[in-house]
Amino acid sequence: MNRLHQILDGALSVLGLLFIGWLFWRSLKRSYEPGALILKWVITAVVLFFIFKRVMPDFGRGGLDAIVGLMEMLACGFVMTLTWRHSFIDLIANPLASLYDGGRDEIESKPYYSVTNAKRQRGEYLEAIAAVREQLAKFPKDFEGIMLLARIQAEDTKDLQGAEITLNKFCEAEDAPPKQVAAAWTTLADWHLKIGVDVDSARAALQKIIGRFPETEMALAAEQRIAHLGGAEKIMLAAHDRQTITVPEGVNNIGLLDSTTFLQPKEIDPGRLAAAHLKHLETHPHDSEVREKLATIYAHDFKRLDLATLELAQLINEPRHSPKQIANWLNLLANYQVELGADVATVSATLEQIVERFPDLPLAEVTQRRMARLNLEFKGKEKTPDVKLGVYEQNIGLKYGSPPRGG
């Protein structure tokens, strides 16, 4: 038992010494004057040694020696007061002063671009580039600064090649955050379209996202952007190659015509539009916008719930889509099921998928409220029977007085 006590006492002594050593080391690191702090420790150690070796024995002997010991203790207290007075004052005053000056916590070092933005607003673009490069020399991985530099190069100095070099240097680093990389290359693609009028370079920038982060939401978004680059190219070519448009002569005496139905624009044939969407999806199968439009044509124009369900199912089962998008498509499918004659159980099963997939999101609560009103939704779709009016009711709006009595 005594052996156990000895081991515990030894362990506690070691832990105590380690704790005291840690306190000394922490105080030394936080001190503005580490040399002065070490000197204070040395003086304190000498004073304590003197107290234990000289003053305490004098107190133990009593008499005149005790009086001498008391004087020696007062002298030691005076020396300790001179040594640690500033530290005691800081200990009391610092908590109050920190309410106003923030205390001794280190201020986080970060770049400042106010000078850059001011020079940019004044049109001093080269000076703005120099100012932002000065900050990036201190913080080379700061995404805000890199994008600011590339934006000045692309939008202000029209140096699109320089902006591309700036962004590629950041994006090609192994430790670059994925979302920042995707945002940088997406912005570069926008600049290639708007400034460079170069669809191929825009497509190449988006392809880098797909290659760097395959099978991710970022890759899916890039694929959808690529799917619509063809339309952007047509718009740009039309803007640069404007041709004279001949406006046909208007119809004379339009107010005297019996009917103006022939003047209304012809609607696009749903079959041709569906075929165009299918052809587009063969090349760009991840274009969710076009696939949703195709499902709408199947449901509204052809009343084919089965085909609309197949198209929406491909969108719903794509794991890279966001919960909000998936919930929207499930609600859309439920709408089509209600409109095209599905039963309550089928619609409930469709909506139940939202609750099962996203139980912790507000989407689940909104869906449960819709499911509670589902029977009312079906009743609202029921057709009311037509009421045939008699002769009197049909002409009631044309009568001005009561019918004559008698013959």
Image (cartoon, helix red, strand yellow):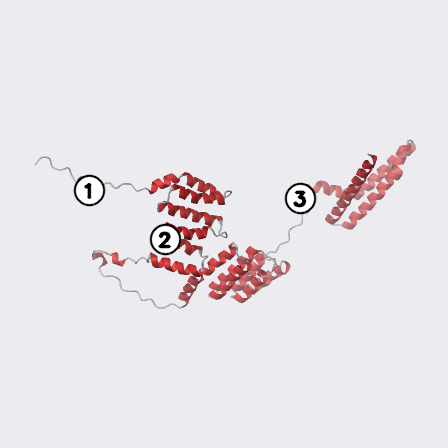
Among numbered discs 2 and 1, the one appearing first in the sequence? 2
Single out the residue that lies furthest toward the left: 407
The residue carrying pointer 3 sits among few (fewer than 14), some (14 to 19) or many (20 or more) residues within 10 Å by Cα, namely few
Label 1, label 3: how far apart the Cα atoms are: 87 Å
**In the image, which is nearer the foreground, mark 2 or mark 3?**
2
Marks 1/3 in contact by CB < 8 Å: the verdict is no
- Image spot of residue 223 (x, y percent): 48, 59
- Image spot of residue 162 (x, y percent): 55, 66
Give the residue type at disc 2: Tyr
Question: What residue is pinned by disc 2?
Answer: 298
Among numbered discs 1 and 3, the one appearing first in the sequence? 3
- Picture residue at 37% right of the left edge, 57% below the top: 274
**What numbered label is drawn on residue 394?**
1
- Picture residue at 60% right of the left edge, 62% below the top: 133
The quadrant of the picture occupied by the N terminus is: top right
Secondary element type, mark 1: helix
Residue 378 shows up from this direction: yes
Rendered view: 77 above or below 204: above
Secondary element type, mark 3: helix
**What numbered label is drawn on residue 98?**
3
Marks 2/3 in contact by CB < 8 Å: the verdict is no
Secondary element type, mark 2: helix
**In the image, which is nearer the foreground, mark 1 or mark 3?**
1
